[in-house]
Structure formats: structure tokens, C-alpha cells
Image (cartoon, rainbow, N blue to C red):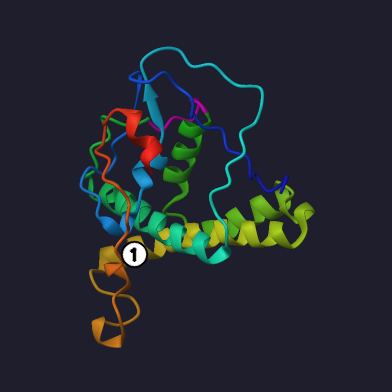
Amino acid sequence: MRFGATGLEKLVLFRRGKGRFECRIGDQDSTMADMEVHEHVLVAGSVGRCRAGLDHHNVHSLARYIEKHNAYSNWEAELYYRKLQGRLAEADSLPAAPFGNRAQRRRWLKQLTFRLPGTSVALFLYLYVCRGGFLDGLPGLIYCGFQAVQHFHVKAKVYEKQVGEPMLGGAEDGPNNDEVVWSVPALGCGEPSSRVGEL
């Protein structure tokens, strides 16, 4: 796919021992998968930019994509819930900033619009229409739809945390999906980046 804002600018290459992953939720549980590893790397020193792109092939089926993004939405919902409660210590993280790098601007925009209604629909329209996701055909529609649904899942899970009870019934309705066990090696926040290859 070439459109729909599928490109991502992210720091992925850095000198060993000079970078560490930011720590936004230090006590994450197994339902949040390996999300902290997907957050931003904080480096000591200057950062350059590669001219060539880097392909990231990490999903082999839609079922796996949905499974991973459900775990990611658990993590992001916990993050926003703590932020709304004023319980999020972000001293060891990349600050949100309207005039910072791309990641800082994106984080700032998400925080600014999180409480607004209809942002999931607005995200879909932005990706599919404004960023040209429709030019990728059916795969573009699926991708843009999944991005909007992911955003909606986060907002719904935050709401569920705020009201303090399951939105769609209790445990008697069926198995608890929060008990999914992930086989992800532990990686402590702020831990040196040398263990990334083990994931």
C-alpha cells in the first residue's frame, strides 16, 4: 500500500547503549503485549535521518493483526485512563509538543482530540479521503477502517474503566478475554536496548 498515511517515521537504528525505550506504564500486564517496545527510543546524542525506507512486515494475517491491536488498545486505554486521572508519570517519556518531531506532534494531537466525540470517524475520513487511502483499493479501505476502529476501541476501553464495570455483561456471559497469556519476554522500562532482538 502506498497511501492512507501507511508510512511511519520512527527511530529504529541507534548505537547500542545510547538508546532506551521510554517508560510510560511501568507495571503493564500480559494483556498489553509488547507495547512498550513499540514506543519511542530516547537517545543520548544527535539523531540523523536515513533516506531509504525500511519495510516492516510484522503481520501475516488479518486475524493476527486484530489480535495484536486488541492488546495494543488495552495498553493505550490504560495509558489514557491514567493520564485522565493524573496518575501517569511521564518524566521518562517523549513529551507531546505541537512543534516537536513527528512523534511528538502526533502524541500532542491525540491528547488534544481524545475527549472529542466522533474522532474515530474523523480519523477514517482523514486517512481514506484526505490521505488517499481509497487509491489503494480494498486493502486501503480495510487498513483505514482498522485504524479508525483501533482508535474507537481505545476510547471505549477508557470509558469502561471510568464506569468501573464491563460494558457488555459480566464474567457469566463467557470466557474472560483479559486472561489471554502472551509469550513475550519481559523487558523492563528504561532497560538497555540490547534485548530487542529477542522479541
CA neighbours of label 1 inside 10 A, class few (<14), some (14 to 19), many (20+): some
Q: How many marks?
A: 1
The residue positioned 39% from the left and 29% from the top of the image is: 41
Q: Position of residue 22 (x, y in %)?
A: 32, 33
Q: Is residue 98 above or below residue 170?
A: above
Q: Quadrant of residue 192?
A: top left
Is residue 98 part of the magenta span, yes or no?
yes
**Secondary structure found at label 1:** helix
Q: Nearer the viewer, residue 44 or 120?
A: 44
What range is drawn magenta here? 95-101
Q: Position of residue 88 (x, y in %)?
A: 24, 42
Q: Quadrant of residue 123?
A: bottom right
Residue lying furthest front = 198
Going by the numbered disc 1, the residue's amino acid type is Tyr
Q: Is residue 168 above or below residue 78?
A: below
The residue positioned 57% from the left and 60% from the top of the image is: 146
Is residue 180 part of the magenta span, yes or no?
no
Q: Is residue 54 above or below residue 75?
A: above
Q: Position of residue 53 (x, y in %)?
A: 65, 31
Locate residue 105 relative to residue 132 in the image: left or right: left
Quadrant position of the C terminus in the picture: top left
Residue that numbered label 1 is attached to: 159
Q: Position of residue 87 (x, y in %)?
A: 20, 45
Q: Judge whether residue 118 can be spotted in this image.
A: no
The residue positioned 37% from the left and 20% from the top of the image is: 16
